Image: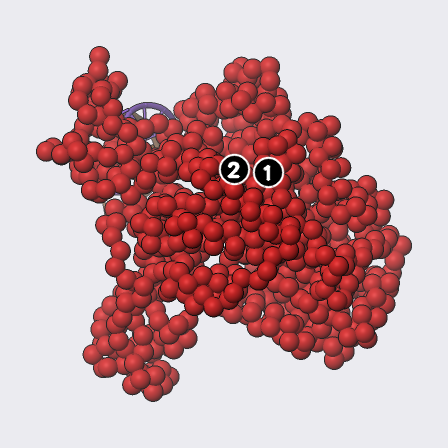
Chain colours: A red, B brown, C purple
Amino acid sequence: MSVAGPILQVAVPSPLRRLFDYLPPTGADPGLLLPGIRVQVPFGRTRPVGVLVAVAAASEVPPGRLRRALALLDRTPVVPPVLLELAAWAAGYYHHPPGEVLQTLLPVLLRQGAEARVGGVPCWRLTAAGRAVAPEGLTRAPRQAELLRRLGEAAGGELTPDDLPEATDWRAVLRTLVDKGWVERGERPCLEAAAVGRDTPPALNPAQSAAVAAVGEAAGRFQPLLLDGVTGSGKTEVYLQAIATALAAGRQALVLVPEIGLTPQTVARFRRRFAVPLAVLHSGLGERERLCAWLAAGRGEAPIVIGTRSAVFTPLARPGLIIVDEEHDASFKQQEGFRYSARDLALVRGRLERVPVVLGSATPSLESLRNAGEGRYRRLVLPERAGAALHPRFRLLDIRAAALDEGLSPPLLAAMGGHLDAGGQVLLFLNRRGFAPTLICHGCGWVAECRRCDARLTLHARAGRLRCHHCGAEQPVPRQCPACGGLDLRPLGQGTERVEEGLGRHFPGVGVVRVDRDSTRRKGAMERLIDGVQAGASRILVGTQMLAKGHHFPGVTLVGILDVDGGLFSADFRAGERMAQLIIQVAGRAGRADRPGEVVIQTRQPDHPLLIDLIEGGYDRFARAALAERAAAGLPPYTSLALVRAEAPGGMARPLAFLESVAERARALALAGVQVLGPVSAPMERRAGRYRAQLLLIAPRRADLHALLGPLALELEGMQSGRAVRWSLDVDPLETF
DNA sequence: AGCACGCCGACT
DNA sequence: GTCGGCGTGCTC
C-alpha cells in the first residue's frame, strides 16, 4: 500500500542511513517544493532542520505513520543540485548517513535554521575617544575593561559577535561603551575586499606554459590533471594563471589547501594578483562570516574561493576550475565523524560540474601517481628551474655507533659549523616536540606514563610539566620517583625543546629559533619567528613538521633530519610514504638558485632500500619502488580498504565483542573478493581512557568492497552490541595498523 | 544520536 | 509511598 501525492524525501540529521518521507506542510505551494531547500520536520519529539532531497509521487511508509512537514525554510534551494548529487555520492561511497552528510555540508547557521541571507557582518571598533581610554583604569567595570582591551588587540581593530566568548552576554556592555562614545558599531563585508591586484604575472617557463595550456584545454569538461612539480618549480604560478584564464572566461575557481597551507601569505599572494573579491574559508572564521562567504560563492559573487577541506562543499554559481594544492596532505581526509577525503570529493565534484581538477604536489600520493600512470589523470611535470636551482645533495649519516650530543652526531655538528661559518643558515627537523619523550627514574627504571593512554608522558622542561600528546593530560614534573622515592629522574630522548637548548650551548651567539606547536601557540608568533629567520637574526632553525609546509628559507644551506627511523619502523604501511614526503618537503625549504642545499639525514637504518631509493633517485624512484611494494603486498592503491573501528571505556571486551560480530556478519555477507582481517586492538590500545579495536576489510576490487559495505553498514546500525561501543566506518582509511 | 518508555533500589 | 538508575526501542 502506498500514499499518493507529493511526498517529501528529507535528509534528517540523524545517524540513520536513510531518508525520511513527509507530507508537504499544509497549504504549501507545490511549486516551492524544490530539492535543496531546508525543511523543518517533526522527528520523534524533536523538530530538526532537514534538507529536501527529492519529491516522490508516492511513499511506502504506511499512511498512518506519515507526518506532515512543519515548514519550508527556503524559497530557493540553499543546496544546489550538484551539491545534492555530491552529497548523495558521498553518503553512498562512505556509507555514511545522508542526513549527517548534508549537515556537514551546510554552514552551522543554516543547519540551525537561520535565514539564508547575507548582510554585512556586524562588528564593533574603538572610536578615537575609546582609544584614548586606558582599560586598566576601569577597575569598577571589569567587563568594559576586558572589551576595550580585546578591541585594542583585535586584528583589524574590529570584533564581531563570533569573536566574543558565548558564556557572557556582551551586548549590554557594548551598548554602555557605545553610549560613552568609546565604541562604534559598523558592518564588515564578509568577502576579502575587492583586492589590490597589482602583481603582474611573471613570464612562464615552457613547462609552466604547457601546464597552464593543458588546464585551459580542459576547460568546460571534467579532466583530472596531476601537477607534479618540485618545490620552487612554480606550481603556484601555474595555479594563478590557470585561475586567471578561468576568471577571464567568467568562471569561478575553487582552491583547496591543507590546514596549515591557508596562511596569510597564501591569501596575500592571491590578493596581490587578482582584483576580485576572495572568499576565504578557514577554521578561524566566525559563523556569520562563513555563511556570508558561502552564500556569496553560491551567487557567483566570489570569483575565487579558497579554503581547507570543508570548502569542497562550497556552492559555486559558475564553476570553472578546481585546484587541490599539496594533494598528498593528510589533512584533506577528515579523521572523525563523516570521514571523507576532500581531495577525492573534489574529483567527484569536478566530474559533476564538468570542470578540470588540478591536483598539485611536489610529492604526489601513491594513489594519484597510480591514477596518472594508468592514464586516468593527465600528468604535468614541472622540472626544476632550468640551470639555476641545483638539486640538494643528500647524505645519510649512520648513527648506530655515533656518540650523540643532544641528538646530534659529530658529523652533523661539523657540517653545521661549516655552513654557519660560510654564512649559511641551518634547519633541523625533528618531528617530536617537548624536551624529551620520556622521563625515567635512574634508580628503579620507573617511567612517567599517562594514566588514560598507553603512552609515555612527554617532558616539557620549560613549562615544568609532563604532558600526554595523545589526550592532553598534564601534570607537574615530580621531584622524586613515585615508585622508589629516588631523586635521579632523567629525561630520555630528544624533543625540539632539548635540541634548541643544546644548540644554544654549541653555537653561542648564533641565534636559535624553535618552531613547533608550543612555540607558535600565541597568535602571530609563527610569523614573528619566521620573519626573524628570514631577516637573518636567527641562523639555526629547529622544528617539527610545521616547518615542512609553506615557508621558504632562502638563506638555509643545510637541512638536518635528526631522526628518520620513527617513520620507517612504524607498522602503518603508509609510514614510508609519509616519511619520504616529509623529507622532500623539508629539503625543499632549503637553498635557492645560487646556493645549493645540503640535506643530512641521521638514521640507524642506512641500508633501508626505500631510503636509499629516495636519496639517490629522488621522490620519483622512491614512489616507483614503494608502488611495487604495495602491489606485491596487496595494499592500496592496488586494493581498497575499509576499517571498522570501535571503542569503549572500561576495557577491550566490548569493542572486541562488537567487532567479532561484525566480522562474522562480514564473512557471511562477503563475496570471495573481500578479506576480513581481525578484529585486533588498535596500535595504541587505550587512548584518553577508551579502549580501541578495529577490523580491516581488504578487497582487490573496489566494487566488491562496496557491495559488502552497503548491507554491512545497515546491519551495524541495528546491531545490539553496537550500543555499548562507539563505532565508526572509515572507507579509504589513512591510518591503518 | 537523542529521547522516550519501563521496571527495580534509596530517600523526603 | 516517590525520584531516578540505565536497558531496549523508535524516529517518516
* Dot 1: chain letter: A
Q: In which image quadrant can residue A148 be found?
A: bottom left
Spatial CA span between label 1 and label 2: 8 Å
Q: Residue furthest right?
A: A401
Reading the image, the residue beneath label 1 is A378
Are there few (<14), some (14-19), or many (20+) residues within 10 Å of tag 2? many
Q: Residue at x 65, y 46 (%)?
A: A381
* Dot 2: chain letter: A
Residue B7 image offset from top left, x and y in percent: 30, 25
Apparent side of residue A301 relative to residue A560 in the rendered image (left or right): left
Which numbered circle lies on residue A223?
2
Q: Residue furthest top?
A: A1
Q: In which image quadrant can residue A438 be found?
A: bottom right
Find out whether the residues at labels 1 and 2 contact each other: C-beta distance under 8 Å: yes
- Secondary structure beneath dot 2 equals strand
Residue A499 image offset from top left, x and y in percent: 73, 65
Residue A727 image offset from top left, x and y in percent: 48, 34
Tell me: residue A166, above or below residue A584.
below
Is residue A199 at least partly visible in the picture?
A: yes
Apparent side of residue A611 relative to residue A369 in the rendered image (left or right): right
